[in-house]
Structures are given as C-alpha cells and as structure tokens.
C-alpha cells in the first residue's frame, strides 16, 4: 500500500515498471503488479496441485492402472489398426525391450510430462508481471492446476502432450538464443501428441498462434511449419476417422492381459473403442440434455469465464483478446454433442486461451494497462480453491480445498 497525493491528476494506468498511477480521489492503492507474496503463493499452490495429481497417479499404477487414465495410453495396434494405437504400441515395445510391465513406461511418461508442463508454467508465472493478472489464470478452476487436482480422474489424458508442447514455446521469450531448438522440440512433441490422440488436433489453432507469437519465424521457416502442422493434423485426423472403432475391444486388450494386466483395466477407454459417435451422443443426451444439468454447466462456464472477461478488460487490446477467446472455442465445439467429457472441453478452451494470452503478454503483443481489483483477486483465489468443474458432470463446491482437507460432497 502506498500513499497518493491529492494533487495527482492521472488515471489508473499500468506503467510497465511495476507501478500504477491512480485517480486523485484514491488516497491508497494496493500495488499488486510485482508482489513477491503472490509469486510465492503461485509456487505453493502449484506444488500442492502437482502433489495431489502425482499422488493419485502413483495410486492408480500401484492399483493396477486406471481404466481411463492409463488405459487410453495403452490402446494399441498390436492386433489391428485403430486410432490412438501407435503410441500404445510404442509403449508396449519399450516395456518389452526393457523387461518392464507396460504400466511403468506409462507412469514415467505421464509423470515426466506433468512435471515439465507444470514446471514451465510455474517458471513463467513467477517471472511475468503483473502478478495480479497472472493470478486470474493460475487459480482458474478450469486451468490445469486446480482442474486436475480437484478431479484427478480427469487428469493426465493425452492432451497433456499438446499442453506440454505449447508450454515449451513459452520458454522462447525467456531463452531467445535457444529459440530454434525449443521450437523444433515443441513441434516434434506436438506431432507426437496428434498421432497419440486426435483430440490434440483440436489444439492446432492455439498451438499455431502461440508458435507464431513466440517464434515470429521468417517466411521460409513459417511456411515450413505451416506445412508440417497441416500434414500432421490432417493426417492424424484422417487416420482417426478411417479407424474409428473396433468390432471387439479384446483385440486391444489381449496384448495387455498377456503382459499380466488385469482384464478390468480394459473396461474404460479400451472398451469405449467399440463404440461410435452415435453412442457418445446418446450418453451426452442422458447426462447433459436436461434443463437442470445443462443449466448448471452453463452457470459453471459463466462462473469460470467471468474472471477471464475481467482480465481481458484490463488489457490494452481487449477486443483482440476477446476475439481470440471466442475463436479458440470453435475447434472444441464439435466435441460437445458426441462426448460426455464436457469439463475437459472447457479445460481445452481455457488452456488454449491461457497459452495464447501468456505468449502475447511475454512478447509485448498485449499489455496489462489497468490494475486488478484486490476484491477480484481475493474472489478468484477462493474460486480456485472451492469451485470444481469435474471432467464429466455438473459443478460442485469442493475443489482443491476438499482434496487437501476432505469436506465436500463425494
């Protein structure tokens, strides 16, 4: 808190050096743009969330694997070609080569991506200013920290690969001398994500925007990257559409049970590979297409979206940011009628906007020019602790706080 002379005549304006000018009627103002306490709060909150997610992951593996979280990574092409199968076959080959159970390389890969993704995000959040604007992203219930920690069952799906690829690009403004190595590594990883799960293709627009903002490639490099992304995305999508399902899921399960994985492991994501889009649409209708559940989901979208609209209003180019937010929801919209993971699709939208926003802010494309209200900051922090939008289902009051000290509904 700092005292302001009554004679000052300037309006609220972020100066870019960690200070705000204020209206003359305001005698005191909280300057949160470079608050070290917030930076430490980010770090503590992030570590707690990572710990909750990693602990659940370890429990899954020790219990024989989760039929959704790990099984999706082990869908394979051993007996017939199927979408998402290439990565699973590669993991089975690695496990056979090293003489390990198939769940071990899955566990290592999921944990590694989790630590890299969250480590980069914490590095970016603790370095960037203003911290008060960063808090709106950090504590969003639909951002990976709170979203995965509050509902670990929906965490660590294969969008983890796409998110990590985009996070790597945020290192370019921090380490500009290594920008080509970072961009090359990120592009390869994003390609792996698209091959591993077609859902990462829907992150292609956000990835392209982050890549352009952070790298600002020359025309030859830019054209080459566009061609690469187009080939990867269209190729992965075409393969997924022509190998949508299998007649009998045991063709996918058999290579796993032959390696001492229990048959119950196959009753989730692997069994789902027998189903088509019409079955998914029926599930959506049974869960969400009621006035109550649809209304609650829309309320949750509003509760989670309002802080982002407030953040956009703090920018020097709010209409451009709002346009980007609206544009980035378009690739996700086709998922809502055919798949019940509506919370995950919300997470896709929030993460896409967050990565693009962070890329624009770190490169100076956009600037925060208006201060964030202390009251808004407090409400956002509380929201991140107690509001939970599950990956499937309606919102509830529980969140990260209930995972730390169980008190919410089960």
Image (cartoon, rainbow, N blue to C red):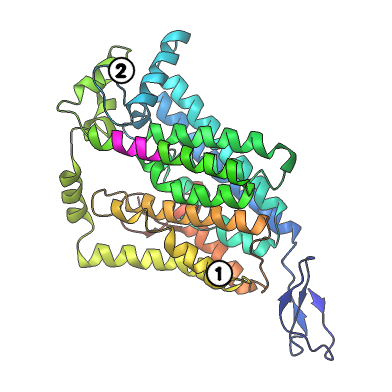
Q: Earlier in the sequence, mark 2 or mark 1?
A: 2
Q: Is the stretch drawn in magenta largely helix, strand or loop?
A: helix
On whether residue 150 falls in the magenta region, the answer is: no
Query: Mark 2, residues whose alpha carbon is within 10 Å: few (<14), some, or many (≥20)?
Result: many
Give 405 or 348, whichever is nearer the viewer: 348
Q: Quadrant of the N terminus?
A: bottom right
Question: What is the x, y in percent for residue 387?
Answer: 45, 59
**Is label 1 in a helix, a strand or a loop?**
helix
Give 195 or 346, whichever is nearer the viewer: 195
State yes or no: discs 2 and 1 in contact (Cβ < 8 Å).
no
Identified at 24% across, 17% down, the residue is 79
Question: In the image, which residues are magenta?
Answer: 232-239
Give 309 or 190, whichever is nearer the viewer: 190
Q: Which residue is mark 1?
A: 312
Tell me, yes or no, if residue 175 can be seen here. Answer: no
**Residue 267 marker:** none
Question: What is the x, y in percent for residue 300?
Answer: 38, 64
In the rendered view, tell whether residue 192 sits above or below residue 229: above
Disc 2 to disc 1, how far (Cα)?
Answer: 48 Å
Question: What is the x, y in percent for residue 202?
Answer: 39, 47
Q: Residue furthest front?
A: 220
**Is label 2 in a helix, a strand or a loop?**
helix
Q: Which residue is mark 2?
A: 256
């Amino acid at each position: 808190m700092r005292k302001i002379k009554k004679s000052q005549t300037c309006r609220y304006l972020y100066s870019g050096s960690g200070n705000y000018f204020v209206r003359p009627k305001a005698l005191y103002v909280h300057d949160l743009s470079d608050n070290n306490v917030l930076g430490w709060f980010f770090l503590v909150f992030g570590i707690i969330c990572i710990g909750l997610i990693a602990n659940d992951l370890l429990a899954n593996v020790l219990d024989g694997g989760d039929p959704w979280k790990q099984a999706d990574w082990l869908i394979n092409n051993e007996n017939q070609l199927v979408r998402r199968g290439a990565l699973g076959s590669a993991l089975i080959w690695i496990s056979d080569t090293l003489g390990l159970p198939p769940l071990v390389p899955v566990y290592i890969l999921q944990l590694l991506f989790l630590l890299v993704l969250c480590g980069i995000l914490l590095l970016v959040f603790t370095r960037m200013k203003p911290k008060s604007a960063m808090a709106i992203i950090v504590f969003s219930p639909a951002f990976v920290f709170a979203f995965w920690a509050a509902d670990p069952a929906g965490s660590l799906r294969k969008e983890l690969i796409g998110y990590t690829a985009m996070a790597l690009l945020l290192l370019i403004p921090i380490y500009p001398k290594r920008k080509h190595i970072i961009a090359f590594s990120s592009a390869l990883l994003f390609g792996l994500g698209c091959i591993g799960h077609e859902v990462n293709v829907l992150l292609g627009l956000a990835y392209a925007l982050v890549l352009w903002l952070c790298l600002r490639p020359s025309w030859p490099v830019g054209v080459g990257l566009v061609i690469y992304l187009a080939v990867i995305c269209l190729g992965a999508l075409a393969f997924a559409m022509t190998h949508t399902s299998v007649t009998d899921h045991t063709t996918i399960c058999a290579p796993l049970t032959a390696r001492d994985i229990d048959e119950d492991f196959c009753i989730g994501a692997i069994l789902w590979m027998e189903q088509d889009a019409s079955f998914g649409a029926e599930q959506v209708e049974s869960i969400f297409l009621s006035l109550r559940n649809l209304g609650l989901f829309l309320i949750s979208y509003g509760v989670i979206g309002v802080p982002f609209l407030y953040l956009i209003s703090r920018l020097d180019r709010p209409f451009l940011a709002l346009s980007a937010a609206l544009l980035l929801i378009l690739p996700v919209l086709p998922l809502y009628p055919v798949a019940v993971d509506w919370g995950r699709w919300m997470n896709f939208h929030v993460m896409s906007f967050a990565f693009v926003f962070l890329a624009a802010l770190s490169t100076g494309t956009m600037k925060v020019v208006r201060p964030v209200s202390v009251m808004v900051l407090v409400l956002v922090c509380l929201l991140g602790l107690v509001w939970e939008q599950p990956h499937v289902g309606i919102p509830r009051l529980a969140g990260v706080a209930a995972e730390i000290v169980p008190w919410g509904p089960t």
